[in-house]
Amino acid sequence: MNLKEKIPNDYKDIINKITKAASLGGYTVYAVGGFVRDMVMNRIPNDLDIMVEKENGGIEFSKFLSKGLKISEPVIFERFGTAKLSIDGREIEFIMPRKEYYDENSRNPDTEIGSLMQDALRRDFTVNALFLRLNDMELVDLLNKGLKDIENKIIRVTDSSAADIIFSQDPLRILRAVRQSCQLGFKIEEQTYASMKKNAFRIKIVSPERIRDEINKMLECQNVSQTFKMLDELNLLEFIFPTIEKEKFVRYFFEKLPENNKTAVILAFLLGKKSDKILTGLKYPKDFIKTIVSVSEGYEYLKEHNAELTDSQIRKFEKRYRNVLPVIADLCFLSDKKRFDVLFKKINEMSLKNELIPEREMFSGEELMAIFKKPSGKWIAETKIYVEDLLCDNPKITKEETLKEIKLRLKKQSL
């Protein structure tokens, strides 16, 4: 199979530079992993990894390459015998063929130089164990299964006799299998799947950040509902999303959600009021968690009050959830489009008629202190809430009319 023509334009110059340097220095270099798999499948590849067939070859060659190209020196990771080098704006990882040794309580292995076959076997799945020798553009399938499994759309561990060891040593591979099955539309081979289920409990040794990253990638897939069903079958949901309402991903399909809000909508829908604790445990960014919590709250409020909302309540709701309103709308339409369609059409009409609360505050804290000649205090926040209530009842109220109402309120409070 000739893969030279399938190298994406973004990587052609990079690979040419690597190949020329390898020829000058007498190195044998391979593109490996998902990059090669995707080219075979006619998908757009990313994350180029280069394997150099020599002890500490990745580190040594990356230094040689950086000098030849007159670019910044590579970042070295001595423990793993790897290096990262930025070429033309792309982060390229350089490695050596290696064997790995695991401690029972960690998925981070110790490594040493290995043969090409040992490197192929230490990888997760056959479809990711293909090597493209860049020196002559020869595709190498040492396991004699990678190309066939791509053709048959199968996810299979590199060594079926060691499936339990493969998943026990690095249980993140269980999530990777689910995710790649989802992304590629591949089935997971029966023995591989059985071993995944058997070793699912080992997921507890994986860092929350790595689990989060895999979940995020799963949420970008087309068949998210099926993916969550698979996680449930593997008994992984109890570790990742405890207390999740399973009937939601059984009854609902997420495939038609807009891509820009998809992750937030799904997480808010599945996790609901408990999203704060679960997402914090998975080390999601605080701003993202705040968004999901806000979306969940807004959605729950509408479920309870939708049919009874007055214009004033709509204005207050829109003002409070303005920053996440599109996400709330997508979530509402996912659960019951017919029920919520009228409400969001009305919000849109009110916006077009300037009948919603303006973005800019009518009075700043400084203005209020100057007008009433009072120092800063709790009264400012209370006054702003009062002004918002006035705007909810009458969005056309003028600044002068509002000021009169504030004066009357403060006068009553002082009596």
Image (cartoon, rainbow, N blue to C red):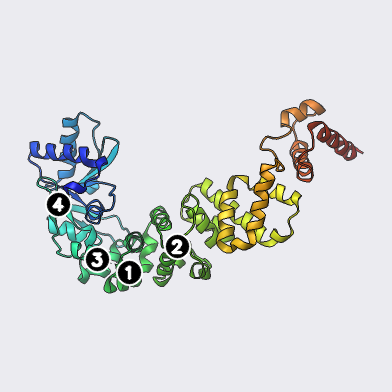
Tag 2 residue: 240
Q: Which mark is residue 2?
A: 4
Q: Which mark is residue 196?
A: 1
Mark 3 residue element: loop
Callout 1: 10 Å neighbours few (<14), some, many (20+)? many
In x, y percent, where is residue 233? 41, 72
User: Going from the N terminus, do you reach mark 2 or mark 3 first?
Assistant: 3
Callout 2: 10 Å neighbours few (<14), some, many (20+)? many
In x, y percent, where is residue 310? 76, 53
> How far separated are the C-alphas under marks 2 and 3?
23 Å
In x, y percent, where is residue 214? 38, 56
User: Going from the N terminus, do you reach mark 4 or mark 3 first?
Assistant: 4
Contact (CB < 8 A) between labels 2 and 3?
A: no
> How far separated are the C-alphas under marks 4 and 3?
26 Å
Which quadrant holds residue 268? bottom right
The mark lying in front, picked from 2 and 3, is 3
Q: Is residue 306 left or right of residue 25?
A: right
